[in-house]
Amino acid sequence: MSRPVQFNINPKPVDREGHIGVVELPAGHIGDGFLATKMSDLVGLGRKNSLWPQPFATSCCGIEFMATAGAHYDLGRFGAERMAYTPRQCDVLMVMGTIAKKMAPVLKQVYSQMAEPRWVIAVGACASSGGIFDTYSVLQGIDQIIPVDVYVPGCPPRPEAILDGLMKIQDLVGKESLRRRNSDHYKALLGSYGIE
Ligand code: SF4
């Protein structure tokens, strides 16, 4: 199975569990009826388990996504069953399929209509790099017009790979600093795409 690749974040040290950021609590931070934690961890926990995907499927990879959302693979296990087809209510843009250059402004508009914080997965070779369509009419990767957080390789990627990509997004979301979206680094990233 192809493994996703993640971009646009600063590398974070892997914790001891390798997955969940659990550390020993200092004395006095836990007791009967209370638990002390960081606000960003609490917000991250809520966000990562309530992702709302906005599918943007233009060709064959979209069929794999349909399988991912079906009963067998069950995308809903991740609290992500609430797919919406309005960008104003979604926080994960999943781009699946070949994006023609004529379609590029539409995709950029959909991204622009999503509220912050928002994340993007490029599903499949076409969305990631243009795939086999090295032609004048096909966008050679959606990261030419919008920032991408996770790339899922494959032509098409299997549903397991798409789920793996979504879990990568969950990792990013859970560990993201609440300050990131207001940082100069992030503003510069959006600015490089001509997005306010
Ligand atoms: S990556 Fe392959 S399967 Fe996916 S849209 Fe492109 S040609 Fe179709």
Image: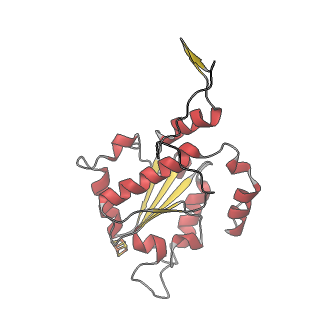
Quadrant of ligand 1 in image: bottom left
Instruction: Say left or right for 183 vs 152.
Output: right
Question: Which residue is at the front of the view, 137 or 7?
Answer: 7
Residue 177: give x, y in percent of width and height. Answer: 65, 45
Residue 25: give x, y in percent of width and height. Answer: 58, 27
Question: Which residue is at the front of the view, 21 or 45?
Answer: 21
Q: Which quadrant holds the C terminus? A: bottom right
Q: Is residue 96 above or below residue 99?
A: above
Q: Which quadrant holds the N terminus? A: bottom left
Question: Which residue is at the front of the view, 3 or 132?
Answer: 3
Q: Quadrant of residue 124?
A: bottom left
> Can the viewer see residue 91 in this picture?
no
Q: Quadrant of residue 10?
A: bottom right
Q: Residue furthest left?
A: 72
Residue 164: give x, y in percent of width and height. Answer: 38, 55
> Can the viewer see residue 23 in this picture?
yes
